[in-house]
Each structure stands twice: as C-alpha cells, then as structure tokens.
Amino acid sequence: ITTISGINSSLIGYGLGIAVADINLDGYPDIYIGNDFHENDYLYINNGKGVFTEEITSRIAHTGRFTMGVDVADVNNDGQSEIISMDMLSDDPYTLKRSLGEDDYDIFNLKVSYGYQHQYTRNNLQYNRGNGHFSEVGLYSGIAATDWSWSPLWIDFDNDGLKDLFISNGIPKRMNDIDYINFVSNEEIQKKLAPGQNKGNNLEMIEKFPRIKIRNKFFRNNGSLAFSDIGSGIRNAKETYSNGAVYADFDNDGDLDIVVNNIDEAAHLYRNNNTDATITGQTTAAAQSGKASLSVTNDTLAALPSFTVSLVGDSLNRQGIGSKLIVCADGAIRLYEKFGVHGFQSSTNIPFHVGLRNTKIDSILLVWPDNT
C-alpha cells in the first residue's frame, strides 16, 4: 500500500533516518524521512484517511544536505514537536578545512532551479512555530556542528523536564576528505577501479581514506532552545565509530542510561550516575567477551526526581504505540509521544519518562492512539 498511501520511492532518495510524530497536532502521526545526498528530505503529513501528502517545501525553508539520523520531540515545552536532523559539519578546525562541504554557487542554484530545496551541510533543528511552519535554529542553539553524526536522541539526562541531546558520531573512512578526492579519487584512479581492474595494489587506495575517531556528543538543554556541550563531564569517554543507540533506565536508579553500538569494537554503555556521582570504569573482561562495557559515566548533571508511565493497550497494540502524554507544570505544556522509531538504527525507552524539576505537576492528560 506504499504508493496508494502517498509515500514516494525515489532512485536518488537515500533514506537513512525516520521519525514518526504528530507534527501538526491533528491527532494523526506524520512521518519525517531524512535523505542523504541530493534528494530533499520528506515530511509526510497524515490526512487521517490512510493517505499522506509530502509537504516539506511548504513547511520548512531549508534542510541538511547529507541528512542522516532524525528525531522529533517537544524541546522547549510548548506542547509542539521540533525536528532535528544530523549532517557532517565538523566542529574541529583541522577536520573542517580538510572536508568537502557545500556545493559551489552555480551547482547550488542549478539544483534549486530543478526543484531541490535549499540544503546546507550542518545539523538542523527545526523549531515548531505553531502555525504549521518551522524555523531552523541549529546555529543559534549551538548544535549545528558535531562532525560525522548519525543518531540524535532527545533524552532528559538530569530529570529537569527539558529534553537534552545525545548524538552518536564517527565513520571509519572519511569519503569527503579533500586530499583524497583531489589526489586519490580522481578520474584515472576510478578507471583502474572499474570492474575487473580492481586487483593488486589498486585496492590499497581504498585504505587511504582518512580515519578519525571522534567522541559522541552530549548537550544540556538550557531552555529557550539553547544548548551547552557537556562532553567534558563524561568520564572515561573515548573516540569511537558509533551509530545506533538506545536509552533506558538500565540500573533502575531513576535516570536514563544509553547503550551505543560501535564499528569494530564492543558496544558501550553510558551509565548515568546523577544520583550518586560514582564512576564506572571499562572492564577488560567485558571488552574481550564482546559484551557491552560500562565505559562512560556522566558526573556533570545533578539528578532530580522523575517518574515513568507504562501503558498496557489492547491486543493489537499492547504498548500503546502512538499515545501522547501531556504534562502541565509551572505554566509549561510538555508533550511526550510514544513511537519506536528514532535517530538512526536506534530506539528508545518504552515507558514515558518524565523529569519533575522539583516542581508540582498541575495535570496529566493521556491520549490513546485513537484520540480517546
């Protein structure tokens, strides 16, 4: 039913990230798809009759150029969902100067003339203006440049009621390296790598891709759509090639932890020790066994109280996927939505996790997927 539902399939649409949320608050889940390379990202608005309409150009002015993972959440507690998408703009001057970035002026305008959206190589945070349209505020928010980024996950690390941000990073071979493109990946080299010619030392050229491991990113939500990098407070953190991730309260201490998959090494478990500020080091045995190692500890954010809401739905939807939890506290309206797809090759904790920020909650409204 893909085609009759209005969902497009494009030969140049390299879809990497997908997020589902009720973008326009009409009671029906919408779909955001991030496309790598040239194709526009897609924003499919659900009309409630089993059909979607792609409306990204009428709602969003510009997007990332190489969109990877995406996530959707109410970031500023106004009851409306924002959209974040990942790209590969480096925050390191050395890496930035060695990396291929934007299209040149003529190619950019040529793409626009053929109907492509304005695209820029950086992370995008689309602020929901509440009128069906978005304003991109990634540079203002301080999260636009995090290097080769894959999976963004909105997580309330410190239980203050504001959703903080985790980003997984890294790629083994940096295909946008300018030196590689100019001196290795040129036309003559490509001819040698044609079918039947990729023998002997020619394959060594593939190994000339630069390899730069980088750390995953953690940002604190300061309110008003502003974020601070708190990576210096993540103990025992190391550079990796990370991609998919999932968060949950693995040790049942009231705060959220994160497990991350890595390329060519064991998974990492970021243990959130807000409650007691203890440090958990990496164990050699765990790394050798291939099991996740407790390698990183967050000692930066002081934890506050929290509670969780677990749903039991009917036989067709036992976990209540598609439900909303609306929390009113201190004049703010927090929106939580339950969908299993987030980031890139990632997922989230099934129960709603609500940070209290030492405040009194005025009311809680639970909306089931059928809008009851």
Image: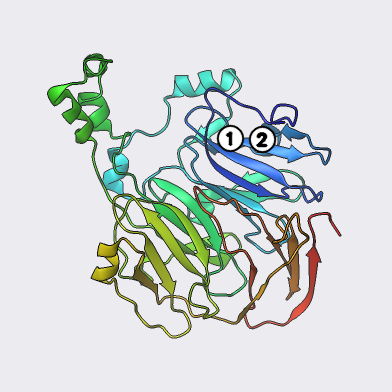
What label does residue 41 carry, if any? Answer: 1
Amino acid residing under circle 2: Ile
Question: Three-letter amino acid code at disc 1?
Answer: Asp
Locate residue 300, reporting x and y percent.
42, 75
- Horizontal side of 163 relative to 290 (left or right) equals right
Contact check, label 1 and label 2, Cβ < 8 Å: yes
The residue carrying mark 2 is 56
Can the viewer see residue 234? no
Residue located 74% across and 39% down the image: 45
The residue lying at 42 percent from left, 54 percent from top is: 168
Q: Which mark is residue 329?
A: none
Quarter of the image for residue 74 reads bottom right
Q: Residue furthest bottom?
A: 276
User: Is residue 13 shown to the viewer in this render?
Assistant: yes
Task: State the image quarter where residue 333 is shown.
Answer: bottom right
| Tally of numbered discs | 2
Q: Quadrant of the N terminus?
A: top right
SS class, disc 2: helix
Residue toward you, 190 or 311: 311
Q: Residues within 10 Å of mark 1 (few under 14, many from 20)?
A: many
Rendered location of residue 277, percent (x, y):
41, 83
30 w.r.t. 100: above or below: below
Q: In front: 285, or 101?
A: 285
Sequence-wise, the earlier of marks 1 and 2 is 1
